[in-house]
Image (cartoon, rainbow, N blue to C red):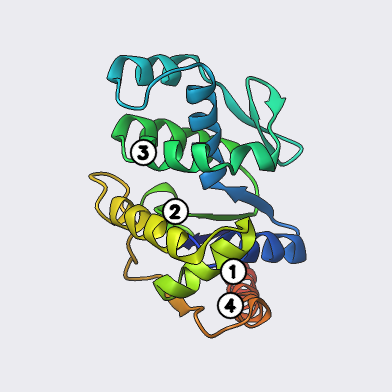
Amino acid sequence: MILAIDGPAGSGKSTIASRVAENFGFFNLNSGEFYRAFALSHISKGRRLDCDDEIRMSLNDVHLSIIDENVAIDGKVVSKAALHTKEVDNASSVLSVITDVRLRINELLRQSVEGKNVVCEGRDITSVVFPNAELKIFLDASPIERAKRRATERGDDVNAVYTELQDRDNRDRNKEFGALKKVEDAIAIDTTHLTINEVYNKICTMLTECLDKSKNTSK
């Protein structure tokens, strides 16, 4: 069973995915952390974001995997803090618009969940990575609310974060491949005026119904 969750930055995807996965005993796959890990590996080697040859080098020599449910680079687990710096945020956003990067990351994501019950979240999970997921959710919130959430998380200025998210949204929604969008069969949830618990309860109810339906169908 795959629960796929898409949505823009700050919509609550990571928090919700983690809680739902824990509650149901599903594997929590964060696609964004794969892109962040690739970006971290790339910039850590002093490679540029605007050089095709250096990006190809990184695609050829980076090895991403899951160890004890954590992302690992070249067999070594990477801390959450290392994956969520401003530099990695920017590098990941730039690199993730490149088709070859997305194709390779998608392969790694699919390989990592074979035979598992999974909650996966990102930007194109419902449309590209797992288009046949049994349950698809699209989380969203107003731009200013998303900026407030991200600013609170990082202790940054709201206005600066708002501008940053606007730029990121523009890149994510206009990617040539894997753009952020709501697919027709995804259930949209606007989290602007909802608490985390309210969103969590909505999705838990949906997933329970989906699991029950699957059990009845298999009988």
Q: Residue at x 48, y 23 (%)?
A: 42
Instruction: Give the x, y percent position of residue 201.
Output: 66, 80
Residue 149 relative to residue 20: left or right: left
Residue 205, by quadrant, is bottom right
Q: Is residue 53 above or below residue 118?
A: above
Residue that numbered label 3 is attached to:
94
Which mark lies nearer to you, 4 or 2?
2
Q: Nearer the viewer, residue 55 or 105?
A: 55
Residue corresponding to mark 2: 125
- Dot 1 or dot 2, earlier in sequence: 2
Mark nearer the N terminus (2 vs 3): 3
Q: Is residue 129 above or below residue 201?
A: above
Q: Write down the residue under mark 1.
A: 214
The CA span between labels 1 and 2 is 21 Å
Contact? badges 3 and 4 (CB < 8 Å): no
Front-most of 57 and 148? 148
Residue 8 shows up from this direction: no
Count neighbours of disc 4 (C-alpha within 10 A) and say few if under 14, some if 14 to 19, many if 20 or more. some
